[in-house]
Amino acid sequence: MKTAIDVQDLWKSYSGIPAVRGMSMRVAQGEVFGLLGANGAGKSTAIECILGTKKADRGSAAILGLDPQQQRSQLFEQVGVQFQEASYPDKIKVGELCEETCCLYRKAADYHFLLNQLGLTEKKKNFVSELSGGEKQRLFIVLALIPNPKVVFLDELTTGLDPRARREVWKCLLEMKKAGLSIFLTSHFMEEVELLCDRVAVLKKGDVVFCGTVNEMIRKSPYERLEQAYLWFTDEEEEIENL
Ligand SMILES: Nc1ncnc2c1ncn2[C@@H]1O[C@H](COP(=O)(O)OP(=O)(O)OP(=O)(O)O)[C@@H](O)[C@H]1O
């Protein structure tokens, strides 16, 4: 199977305090891979080092065989990214933002088609600031898909959404998965992880403490549910009592 993302012994510290400690993992093309971990475990730092927007102290990362630092422009054309705190000017309309994003790419997708696929056609003339949380997240998916990417990175895409909006986003992601896209996501929702992810890695204070399928993760813990297994791997056992 072809490799979409290859991370080898990645290290990153801030002022001498390690945030990611020797992360290694491979994501196959067409796979949905989930990076899990508590707040501050190092997920966003890992994503930024993999994408090359932050420089790792040690180790290497390749996306589609390309070096994110040395081959930025080639990579930019093939990778879609949604960051946790994506911010756009308030006074821009949905259609305008899509058009501006399309201008950045040589082979941009037809954004009208994407807006339609994600149920946002009627919002084309609305200001981005007028969209609901769920609509905004769906717009971020559209923007991430505009490059016609082979790989997309989604950092806590459904955080802050109500259950129905979250399910709408899941439906979109399942469609993307069916279309063969490689997806690297972070999430705090175990239901989402179970539904979407082929494999997961669990980060604890910068260390990868588990990498494998959801079923393997449950089997390797003393528990029967993913949420309990996750808390066990991250040493938050006192929380399990409350589940
Ligand atoms: N620019 C920075 N300068 C200093 N410390 C940072 C910086 N960015 C992150 N950190 C620290 O690195 C650690 C990992 O942070 P990171 O944002 O990668 O975690 P995360 O797993 O993505 O968390 P969350 O789930 O809350 O988004 C945290 O202790 C954080 O305070």
Image (cartoon, rainbow, N blue to C red):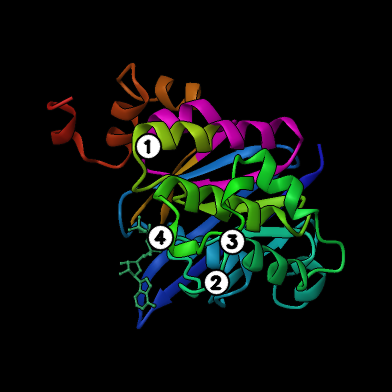
Q: Which residue is mark 2?
A: 92
The residue type indicated by label 2 comes to: Ile
The residue type indicated by label 3 comes to: Val
Q: How many circles with numbers are drawn on the protein?
A: 4
Which residue does the image show at 62% across and 41% down from the upper left?
Answer: 118
Q: Which residue is mark 4?
A: 42
For label 2, count other residues whose C-alpha is less than 10 Å away and answer few (under 14), some (14-19) or many (20+).
Answer: some
The residue type indicated by label 4 comes to: Gly
Left or right of 56? Residue 117 is: right
- Whether 190 is among the magenta residues is yes
How far is mark 1 from mark 2, CA to CA? 31 Å
Residue 58 or residue 121, whichever sits in front: 121
Callouts 2 and 3 close, C-beta under 8 Å: no
Query: Residue 67 appears in which quarter of the rendering?
Result: bottom right
Magenta region: which residues?
171-200
Indicate yes or no: mark 4 CB to ligand 1 under 8 Å: yes
Q: Which residue is mark 1?
A: 189
Depicted 163 relative to depicted 186: above or below: above
Secondary structure of residue under mark 2:
loop
How far is mark 3 from mark 4, CA to CA? 32 Å
